[in-house]
Image (tube, helix red, strand yellow):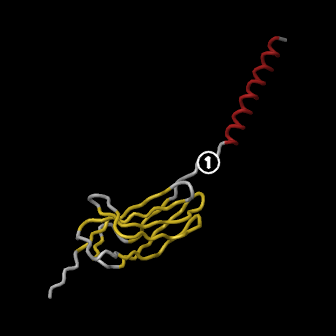
Amino acid sequence: MNNNILKLRLFLMFLSISSCFVIFVSSCKKKDQAPLINFNSPYENSTFKNMDTIPLQLMVSDDRKVENVVISLYKSDNNAPIGSSVIITVNKKEDEIYTDFIINEPTLPAGSYYLKAQAFDGKQYGNDYVYINIQSDTKTI
């Protein structure tokens, strides 16, 4: 009889642990992920001049819904923002974005810069960067 009681206790303990495991696994929520964003163009180290229009192509996706994307230009050596940003409303889980970024700073010195694309899903940010070169637009008279 003691052997049967021991078996019953082991079975009940196994059943209890199994039930806890099933409840734990089923109650786990998937962790919210930051949006993914990638520049498809321009290519890394492309060269532009002051007042050029840069055609941009980006891919953005998220497990929620991407609310917007902000694209900004920065100076590489000091991370200083340059000029105005472009803000694009997305409101989708996935999108391919085609837009233009105008280098609208006529006195911008030649050098190394980067474009930063930042996607926001209402809770988290995802970023991508592409380095570009800007040449001075010297005109001879």
Give the residue at x 42% y 61%: 128
Q: Is residue 137 left or right of residue 74?
A: left
Left or right of residue 29, residue 124 in this image: left
Look at the image and tell me in which quarter the N terminus lies.
top right
Q: Give the residue drawn at x 68%, y 37%.
A: 24
Q: Measured along the vertical axis of the image, is residue 6 above or below residue 58?
A: above
Q: Residue furthest top?
A: 2
Q: What secondary structure is marked by label 1?
A: loop
| Residue in the image at 52% along x and 54% along y | 124
Q: Nearer the viewer, residue 115 or 59?
A: 115
The residue to which callout 1 is attached is: 30
Q: Is residue 81 above or below residue 55?
A: above
The x and y percentages for residue 94 are 56, 66
What residue type is disc 1 on? Answer: Lys
Q: Is residue 7 above or below residue 127?
A: above
Name, please, the residue furthest toward the left. Answer: 141
Where residue 65 appears, as percent x and y from the top left, is 59, 62
Residue found at x 56% / y 63%: 66
Which image quadrant is residue 38 in? bottom left
